[in-house]
């Protein structure tokens, strides 16, 4: 009996679900039919499709709007994505079918909201942060420069300039003072002078001497300067420390191989000596010795001298005398080096210093803009290198490979 009741309830639920589905379908169909009928009723007498006005200038909108539509400015607001007097949004949406005489409401852009850039020259970093925050701006790139008038860590210049109209939340680039440029001294060459004399000269020039290293050198007297660190002709600030490498004569020195790497040892005494000339071989009478022969521009063909038989019938051997070829100097070869200026705010001065066994020589100096490509030709000299300076500060060192 219970089972029959449960089957009866289940069948009733199924029938009710089917009935509800049918009623829902009928209701949806009726609403759709009524909507179409009402749309036909209200739009009788013709319809207009609303165009897409977004992103267009208001003048262009007025010229291109269909007959029967009325364009109305609903509001105006700042927008950094649309230029001034261009449409940001519209209502009704593009593609909507409306009756003639329908109003299309437009939101018009006032362009990017601008503010006046504050005066930052002479301000400290904290004052700059506060002023930019109040002006709805932010800090952009920072560059540093020596200044005779502005104290260190204060603003020397800015971009954009003060009182200039600038977009909200844009960045302001700053040029910051490093204070007065320190007095730079060129370190003269102390190679060959005594250690005491070198100390006196450094003191007179406003420089301090640091550690003293020594190494054996039979070609120099004891305590004679071999090299300095920094190298000779380097630009130093007053008060900087200069280390000395001196000769220990025939005694064992104190400098380790790691210490010697700090010094540039360029001296005539350090250059490889030419190979000793071989003893001349006596030549036959009337034959010019190769050791005494003078080189000519165009080498002469070898001379062959054959002696006649002597009275005793002994045949003299054939003697060849070959004139030495002229010494030809290899042409100077230049290598082009490329360097990209660092990023920043202002142009900077770049210098190329060529260091060879004969000393240091400036091969290029000039001012260039940030990220500008600089190309300099450097003579190819064995065992030489190039040091690159930005505003008299060394930034890179490269070997000049033959």
Image (cartoon, grey):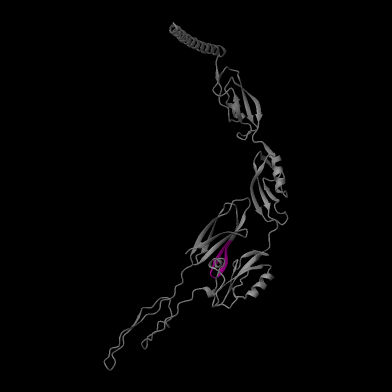
Count of numbered labels shown in the rendering: 0
Q: Quadrant of residue 265 in the image? A: bottom right
Q: Is residue 163 visible?
A: no
Q: With 179 as the anchor, is 350 left or right in this view? A: left
Of all residues, the one furthest to the top in this rendering is 1
In depth, the one of 397 and 299 nearer the eye is: 397
In depth, the one of 269 and 277 nearer the eye is: 269
Residue 233 coordinates in the image, percent (x, y): 61, 67
Q: In the rendered image of this protein, does residue 391 appear above or below residue 111?
A: below
- Residues drawn in magenta: 352-364
Of all residues, the one furthest to the front in this rendering is 1
Of all residues, the one furthest to the bottom in this rendering is 311
Residue at 40 percent across and 78 percent down: it is 324
Residue at 44 percent across and 75 percent down: it is 327
Residue at 66 percent across and 67 percent down: it is 208
| Residue 251 within the magenta-colored segment of the rendering | no
Q: Is residue 367 visible?
A: yes
Q: Quadrant of residue 325 in the image? A: bottom left
Residue 72 coordinates in the image, percent (x, y): 64, 24
Q: Is the magenta region chiefly helix, strand or loop?
A: strand
In depth, the one of 157 and 325 nearer the eye is: 157
In depth, the one of 266 and 171 nearer the eye is: 266
């Amino acid at each position: 009996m219970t089972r029959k009741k449960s089957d009866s309830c289940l069948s009733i639920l199924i029938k009710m679900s089917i009935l509800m589905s049918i009623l829902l379908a009928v209701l949806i169909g009726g609403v759709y039919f009524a909507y179409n009928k009402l749309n036909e009723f209200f739009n009788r007498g013709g319809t207009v499709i609303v165009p897409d006005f977004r992103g267009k200038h208001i003048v262009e909108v007025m010229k291109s709007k269909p007959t029967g539509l009325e364009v109305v400015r609903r509001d105006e607001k700042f927008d950094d994505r649309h230029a001034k007097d261009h449409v940001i949004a519209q209502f009704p949406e593009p593609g909507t079918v409306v009756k003639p005489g329908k109003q299309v409401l437009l939101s018009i852009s006032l362009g990017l909201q601008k503010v006046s850039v504050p005066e930052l020259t002479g301000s400290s970093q904290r004052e700059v942060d506060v002023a930019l925050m109040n002006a709805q701006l932010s800090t952009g790139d920072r560059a540093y420069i020596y200044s005779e008038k502005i104290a260190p860590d204060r603003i020397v210049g800015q971009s954009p300039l003060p009182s200039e109209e600038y977009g909200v939340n844009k960045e302001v680039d700053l040029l910051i003072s490093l204070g007065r440029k320190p007095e730079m001294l060129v370190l003269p060459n102390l190679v060959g002078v005594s250690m005491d004399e070198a100390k006196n000269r450094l003191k007179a020039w406003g420089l301090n001497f640091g550690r003293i290293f020594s190494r054996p050198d039979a070609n120099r007297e004891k305590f004679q300067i071999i090299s300095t660190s920094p190298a000779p002709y380097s630009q130093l600030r007053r008060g900087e420390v200069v280390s000395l490498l001196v000769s220990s004569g025939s005694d064992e020195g104190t400098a380790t191989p790691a210490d010697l790497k700090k010094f540039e040892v360029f001296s005539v005494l350090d250059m490889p000596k030419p190979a000793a000339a071989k003893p001349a071989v006596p030549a036959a009478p009337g034959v010019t010795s190769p050791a005494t022969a003078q080189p000519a521009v165009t080498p002469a063909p070898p001379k062959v001298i054959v002696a006649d038989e002597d009275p005793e019938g002994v045949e003299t051997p054939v003697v060849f005398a070959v004139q030495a070829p002229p010494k030809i100097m290899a042409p100077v070869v230049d290598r082009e080096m490329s360097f990209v200026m660092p990023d920043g705010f202002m142009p900077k001065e770049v210098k190329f210093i060529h260091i060879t066994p004969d000393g240091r020589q400036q091969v290029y100096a000039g001012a260039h803009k940030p990220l500008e490509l600089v190309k300099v030709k450097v003579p190819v000299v064995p065992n030489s290198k190039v040091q690159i300076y930005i505003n008299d500060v060394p930034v890179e060192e490269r070997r000049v490979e033959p």
